[in-house]
Amino acid sequence: MSTTKWVIDPAHSEIEFKIRHLMITNVTGSFKSFSSEVETEGEAFDTAKILFTGKVDSITTGNEQRDGHLKSADFFDVEKYPEFTFKSTGFKKTGEGDFELPGDLTLHGITRPVKLQVEAGGVVKDPYGQVKAGFSVTGKINRKDYGLNWSAVTEAGGVVVGDEVKIQAEVQYVKQ
């Protein structure tokens, strides 16, 4: 069977995260610059080999001051670690249209295994004749596992930034 290559369509994809702030609300952020390629046997994604790369400097939370702090050495240190990557190590069907996506996430110079959950949206041909595949991806990581240790406490002793980071992505790939 022949190998099929798929490339992410950044105009129809988004990579977001949520983290607790003051332990009472979630702050949402996203990465605006990223690339990804997938190789499959034929068009079956259960054989997918996925490589995703994001530019840390493209982080946005809707607040310039916070974004600057996140890019600094207190957090992501974009000058030293300009990218993060995810490389799949499998793609396992867990239900109808549901998959588990294990892989290695490299962030802030540290590589650790993670498991993401994937919901397949389907494969369609768009009005321009391109074959596209869509997926919703979710997962969680602990930011401290990646050396993102900055912390502060409020006057009352509360935590300013939570440790758990929720990942949510909507991705659309174009068959090459």
Image: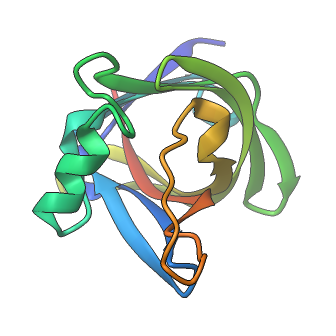
Residue 105: % across, % down: 59, 28
Which residue is at 20% across, 36% downward? Answer: 57
Q: Position of residue 50 (x, y in %)?
A: 55, 26
Task: Residue 122: name its quadrant.
Answer: bottom right
The residue at 58%/79% (across/down) is 23
Of residues 6 and 84, which is closer to you in this image? 84
Q: Residue furthest bottom?
A: 24
Point out the residue furthest to the front here: 155
Name the residue rendered at 48%, 60% in the picture.
152
Q: Nearer the viewer, residue 78 or 116?
A: 78
The residue at 32%/57% (across/down) is: 30
Left or right: residue 91 versus residue 40 is right
Q: Quadrant of the C terminus?
A: top left
Outermost residue on the right side: it is 94
Q: Of residues 2 and 45, which is closer to you in this image?
A: 45
Q: Position of residue 87 (x, y in %)?
A: 58, 22
Q: From where the camera sits, is residue 57 visible?
A: yes
